[in-house]
Amino acid sequence: MSTIIMSKCWDLEMPPTQKSVLISLADNANDQGVCWPSIPTISRRTCFSERAVQNAIKWLERYHLLKADRSNGRHTSYTLTPGEYLMETPAADAPAQQMHGRRKFAGAADAPTPAGNAGVPPQQVRQPPQQVPSNRKEPSTEPSGNRQRASAKSGKTAKTPALFERLWLAYPRKQGKADAEKAFGKLAADEALLEQMLAAIAVQAASAEWREEGGKFIPHCSTWLNGQRWLDEGVTVAEGTAEDASEWWQSSTGIEAKGATCWRARKSGEDFQRYKVGVFKAAGEGPWRQALLADLLRTKSSIYVDVHVYFYGHPPAEGQA
């Protein structure tokens, strides 16, 4: 997953279905925006039908948000281009004026008046209101405040599937996903609440209770959400201190939870050792890197130098290899 591409996609405004499909593609893309997930995979991740996903991809192509390469008969490759997004499409044959990054369509009423021909502005004529028959149904008009709230709710709804996928990736017990997604939707969670949940999962995943008997006592994710277990005593941590609260790098569940918080998803077919190195890289400098390098050096592993270069951009100093 590319944080560069993902960050460019989050703030774009568009319908919820198209936004969810775009975020799912960005989650699979590299830094060049290239990915090739199948339609069923995108459908499973976004919880939309395959037909809805196909229509959303056509929409994203039409608005220059991606380019699809279908020359390979077995799969389609997508290149995401969020910087080329067309915010709106003008009506046929209608000249458009550019204003504040959005298209505004010019009509006769918007045409500028030459200064020499400008006359006295006409007086506003007030017409008496016409009596409307009592049996006539008037169109309902939503107050502006309600429209704003509805717009904000729609934007939050569009982000909910992507936020839930990050939570599900981090949660160690992969059972009852549908119930968990339903419970997550009721919370109307935002980015801040998700980060709090992920920090709590990282701590709990390394606890003795969750690691006992191979995770036998880890609650279902829906139960954890409905009980607001991220607020359990001894779990709530200050922002940015999740890695200080436990030695997450010493367990697979802790590493997976940390991978979710730093946007390092495990790729399809990727072995755990390679994924672990990727998470340590994304997590930045810390005892996890030093512990891994020390272990590789102690066992005289052939990949010690390669891992050191991957972490720091240069080989170890002489005498360390």
Image: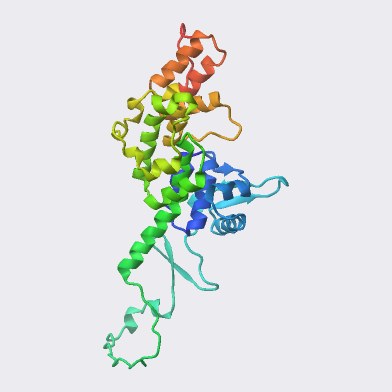
Q: Nearer the viewer, residue 1 or 183?
A: 183
In screen coordinates, is 63 left or right of 131?
right
The answer to whether residue 256 is above or below residue 47 is: above
Residue pictured at 47% horizontal, 33% vertical: 172
Please give left or right for residue 122 compared with residue 14 in the image: left
At horizontal 48% and vertical 24% (from top left) the residue drawn is: 213
What colour-coding does the image apply?
Answer: rainbow
Which residue is at a point 71% across and 45% down the rendered structure image?
Answer: 72
Q: Nearer the viewer, residue 215 or 190?
A: 215
Decide: is 150 above or below 181: below
Task: Answer yes or no: is residue 263 visible.
Answer: no
Q: Identify whether 101 is placed above or below 224.
A: below
Q: Is residue 86 above or below residue 229?
A: below
Front residue of 11/280: it is: 280
Q: Position of residue 252 (x, y in %)?
A: 48, 26
Extreme residue toward the top, this view: 319
**Does 257 sit left or right of 119 as displayed?**
right
Q: Position of residue 131 (x, y in %)?
A: 33, 93
Q: Is residue 58 visible?
A: yes
Query: Number of marks in the image?
Result: 0
The quadrant where residue 251 appears: top left
Spot occupied by residue 224 in the image (x, y as percentages of width and height): 40, 40
